[in-house]
Structure formats: C-alpha cells, structure tokens
Image (spheres, helix red, strand yellow):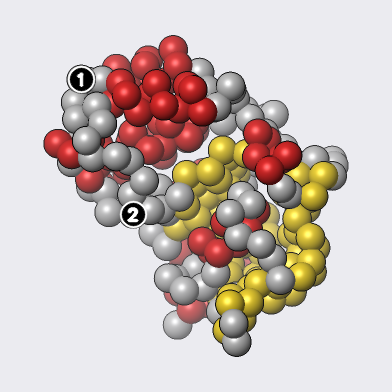
Amino acid sequence: MSSVLSINNLAKKYYNKTALENINLNFEKGKIYGLIGPNGSGKTTLMKVIAGLHKQTSGEVLINNIPASHKTKANLSYMPTDDFLYDSFKVKQILKFYSDMYADFNYGNALNILGDIGIDTEFRVSKLSSGLKGKLKVTLALSRNTDIYMLDEPLNGVDVLSRDTIIDLIVKSYNDSKTFIISSHLVNEIEKIFDYVIFLKDGFVELTGDAENLRQKHEMSIENLYKEVYR
C-alpha cells in the first residue's frame, strides 16, 4: 500500500539544539498510529513539521507524494496541544470560524457530535471545563473531511470520563480511507486503538512497529514496553 505520508531523513534543529534527527517513517491509509514518548521527546516538533508550522532543517515530508507546504494543508487536520480556543467566543462562533476557515469542515457533523456529548453551542469557551474543552478541540479536528488527522496529546489535562469520550470519538471517526496520528504519554488508556506505534526518544525513533507484533515479541503491553524504553 502506498504511503499517504512519508518522512525521509528528517532533522530539525533550533540554534545549537537538535530536536529531531534521522527520522524515517511511512504512514498508510486506514491505520491509527501512536506517536509516544515523554515530554521533550520530539512528538510535538514532529507534528508541527508535518503540519507545515515549522520548517525542517533537512530531509523531506511528503503528503500524497507532494512536499509539505501551504499546498498540502488541506490534506491534514491538526489539533495542537496548545489551548488555541478564544475564551470570549461562544461554541457556535468557533464552529462558524472553522466553517469559514476550512472548506472541508462539516458543520452539521460537528453539531451532531457536540449534541451527543453534551456541549451546548451557546456555551462560552471561558466557561467550559478542561474536559469539555478537550472534547470540543477533538470534535473540531475530526469534523474536517481530509486524509490525515493529527491529534497532539488529546487526553492531556482531561478527566477520565472525558478521555473515554475522546477515544470513542476517534474510533467512530475512523475509516479505511483515513490516517490518524495520535501523540500521547498516557499509553495505558489509548494503546488499545493503535495499529502501529512509534517510540520517540530524545528526537530519535527508538522503536517502531505493528502494535500487536510488538506485544507478542516482547510479551508485554505497549504501556509496559513504554516503561522499558524510557526507564
């Protein structure tokens, strides 16, 4: 199967600090990839390079065989870990903003999801709990119709019940024409949905492979393998 996203000999440096080095990865349609590692391992930097928000120092990122740039942004929906929602906006204003910004944004789908998970569009962002904000951010990202969905730490800072809802939203949005890349250090709660995992350590790919094959080979869960890699 051809790759929807290819990363070849990628390096990213900030002044004298190396954030990423010698990254070679291929992502196929119809799979959910777990990009895992502790804070500072390079997960967010890699995602921002793929999204075109940071320019790599060397190497290439190809989305559908086209070098990543403003031309490929329509092929990718990226949810950063940063709190990017305007506190003064109501949820309905956020939806309108996304609808104006992205031609592929499915407004009706977003409304349906928010109704199902109990977020009223009249709510003001500043009044939302961290769990509701997390669910809103994921809803916005998943309501675009695109090839690649990148979610940076979607479970970070949200309560256990909200985490379950977010994982359920991802599973329901998945189909074999889409590629999901999800970063997390909360491996125990999300490893069950990963088809493939990538362990980043100090900017390098430390270990990678099919999730079930890794479990069988090492005779342990991905969470326990995580503990082995980063202890």
Query: Horizontal and vertical percent for residue 218?
Result: 60, 69
Quarter that holds the C terminus: bottom left
> Does residue 83 appear to the left or right of 69 in the view shown?
left
Query: Horizontal and vertical percent for residue 191?
Result: 48, 52
Say what amino acid the circle numbered 2 marks.
Answer: Asn
Can the viewer see residue 212? no
Can the viewer see residue 107? yes
Q: CA distance from mark 2 to mark 1?
A: 25 Å
**Residue at left 51%, top 73%?**
41
**Residue at left 50%, top 18%?**
106
In the picture of the structure, the residue carrying the numbered disc 2 is 156
Q: Image height check: is 133 above or below 16?
A: above
How packed is label 1: few (under 14 Cα within 10 Å), some, or many (20 or more)?
A: few
**Residue at left 44%, top 12%?**
108
Q: Image height check: is 43 above or below 176?
A: below
Say what amino acid the circle numbered 1 marks.
Answer: Glu
Q: Image height check: is 162 above or below 174?
A: below
Disc 1 secondary structure class: loop
Disc 2 secondary structure class: loop
In the picture of the structure, the residue carrying the numbered disc 1 is 122
Query: Horizontal and vertical percent for residue 154?
Result: 40, 48
